[in-house]
Amino acid sequence: MSQDAYRLKSPSGKETELPVLSGTAGPDVLDISKLYAQQGVFTYDPGFAATGSCSSNITFIDGEEGLLMYRGYPVEQLAKSSSFLEVSYLLLHGELPTVDELADFESTIRRHTMLNEGMLSFFKGFRYDAHPMAMLSAVVGSMSAYYHDKLDASNPQHRDIFAHRILAKLPTIAAAAYKLNCGQPFIYPRNDLNYCENLLQMFFAVPAEPYEIDQVAAEAIDLLFILHADHEQNCSTSTVRMAGSSGANPYSAVAAGISALWGPAHGGANEAVLAMLEEIGDVSQIGKYVDKAKDKNDPFRLMGFGHRVYKNFDPRATIIRKMAHKILGRLGRVDTPLYDLALALEEVALKDEYFIEKRLYPNVDFYSGIIYRALGIPTSMFTVMFAIGRSVGWTAHWREMIGDSETRISRPRQLYTGPAKRDYVPIDKR
């Protein structure tokens, strides 16, 4: 904490000192926790865009510089040299693992991938065309009914078991949802495969023939999971923290986070990018749609450009763009005109003065949907894939919140604009 403080003086002359708190990076924050008690006023910040809801040492974003760090490590370095499970260990434990620590962690995750058979029966209650995110949220919420003996949040061992189970079982749950939609039999996980290889075989293997795992596909998914692993106090992460602050079991908190991620303004953005590209249809139509995007009276919006936090560029987009080239060159399982259209749109937008002035640069969602489509993953599963990657971030934040002595149940206040106090009128006199 710095020695500086802001001083707020009310109309009545009462003065309140607001301490200035400084972190290791990022802007200072004003401690307003005693403002209501001393001045009788609340602050007003719709969407909490300028409010620090907690202190955290997990992830940091510098939107002006285009910087994303996990526990101090730039995401570019992790994407180049690490794996998703190594990044998961880092997010959960604060430091990169040793060789033995990573081996033990990977072994633990492999041994937790199977689902209780009762959970598999749960899927039979869903319609064949149920949205995978609806199934994911429901089944994760049900995990507390199957693993209720290890839900003591005050027990560090129980917190570790929860972290391992949610990270290990979410791909299995996702694959079961996918297979239900396809009308295909469920494929059990295999302990001889790594995290992303296992996911691919559970998604695409069938009992009638052997399935050969494409290592480039596994590499692409691993990279996407690293890039989606955490992103500071975003909507779904804040939802997990808020739900967890009540003392709710962690599976319920993560299920709440999954529901928040399902929103099109959050996790559904890459689906919207694909829909936008299909609407544009052809490179020759780009100028027309760019003009529509500039028109304030036109409802059309270019999806996948700009970011609420990143003001110049999304560092994840640069990394994922290279992988998109690699995937399409290796797999060729997507209609290349769609990808050519995406590149042409990116080039036009980056040179257009309107987009430069508005700082509307490509973000991670611009390319992720194209990669998933190239891998044969349907649009309805895009947000599910996002949830698998983000699950470790949610878990790390839940663990941090539980161990924070300053944690209190989340209880935002409001600016009331409804009717003033009035008396009830009997129905025969209205």
Image: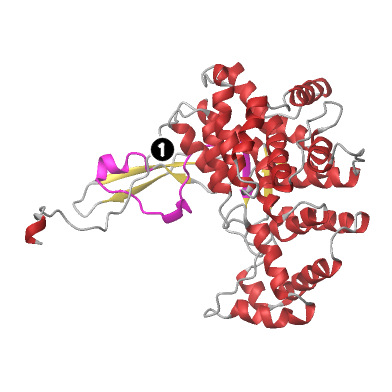
Q: Is residue 69 above or below residue 305?
A: above
- State yes or no: residue 39 in magenta: yes
Going by the picture, which residue comes out furthest to the left?
429
Identify the colour scheme used: secondary structure
To which residue does mark 1 refer? 410
- State yes or no: residue 227 in magenta: no
Q: Is there any visible trace of residue 312 in the rendered image?
A: yes
Whole-percent x, y for residue 139 in the image: 59, 35
Which secondary structure lies at badge 1? loop
Magenta extent: 32-61
Q: What residue is drawn where x is 55% and y is 79%?
A: 298
Q: Nearer the viewer, residue 156 or 422?
A: 422
Whole-percent x, y for residue 251 in the image: 56, 31
Structural crowding at the residue carrying mark 1, measured as other residues with C-alpha within 10 Å and reported as few (<14), some (14–19) or many (≥20): some
Identify the image quadrant of residue 17: top left
Q: What residue is drawn where x is 72% and y is 46%?
A: 227
